[in-house]
């Protein structure tokens, strides 16, 4: 599925869900990892930056951290993405997209969905970084 933003506002909830608020107030897996197996730092078109740091063991994500300088919605998107990706095989984690993140947060109000897109894009970039290093460790 493409990472294009959903511009159909008809299914956007008017307020944040309890799950989204909980992740804003108590984000999981915030920080970074020393000597990560994959890392990505991406700044979205809104100017917010998101980072994902991965530890891969036996082909699965054994540890994951995120950081963002973005708004609370971006914090919630990063937090839930770490929970969706943790313990997943790399191939499965690649399939996590904007809509999986939105579903896990109970949707996001209009104008905030791009935060989920930034989280999905950054996770995929960190996974790609892992695969590039794994396939060519001397680069
Ligand atoms: Fe920038 Fe959410 S407001 S990613």
Image: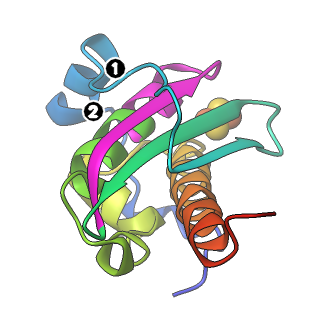
Find disc 1 in the rendering and name its residue.
24
Q: Is mark 2 within 8 Å of ligand 1?
A: no
Compared to residue 57, the image places residue 71 above or below, namely above
Q: Nearer the viewer, residue 82 or 61?
A: 61
Q: Residue at x 61, y 50 (%)?
A: 118
Could you tell me residue 73's position as x and y percent?
47, 30
Say whether residue 74 is visible. Answer: yes
Residue 108: say if magenta.
no
Say whether residue 6 is visible. Answer: no
Residue 61: say if magenta.
yes
Q: Residue at x 32, y 65 (%)?
A: 100
Could you tell me residue 52's position as x and y percent?
53, 41
- Give the residue furthest to the front: 138
**How packed is label 1: few (under 14 Cα within 10 Å), some, or many (20 or more)?**
many
Judging from the image, what secondary structure is the residue with disc 2 in? helix
Could you tell me residue 21's position as x and y percent?
26, 23
Gap in Å between the C-alphas at discs 2 and 1? 6 Å
**In terms of image quadrants, where is residue 63?**
top left
Find disc 2 in the rendering and name its residue.
20
Q: Which residues are magenta?
A: 60-77
Q: In the rendered structure, are the residues bearing label 2 and label 1 in contact, judged by CB atoms less than 8 Å apart?
A: yes
Give the position of the C terminus as an image quadrant: bottom right
Judging from the image, what secondary structure is the residue with disc 1 in? helix
């Amino acid at each position: 599925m493409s990472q294009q933003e959903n511009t159909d506002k008809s299914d956007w909830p008017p307020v944040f869900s309890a799950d989204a608020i909980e992740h804003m107030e108590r984000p999981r897996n915030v920080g970074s990892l020393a000597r990560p197996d994959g890392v990505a730092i991406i700044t979205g078109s809104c100017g917010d930056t998101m980072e994902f740091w991965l530890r891969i063991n036996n082909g699965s994500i054994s540890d994951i951290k995120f950081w963002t300088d973005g708004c609370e919605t971006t914090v919630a998107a990063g937090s839930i993405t770490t929970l969706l990706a943790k313990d997943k095989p790399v191939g499965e984690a690649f399939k996590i997209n904007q809509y999986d993140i939105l579903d896990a947060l109970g949707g996001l109000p209009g104008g905030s969905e791009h935060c989920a897109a930034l989280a999905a894009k950054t996770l995929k970039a960190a996974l790609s970084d892992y695969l590039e290093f794994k396939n060519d460790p001397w680069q």
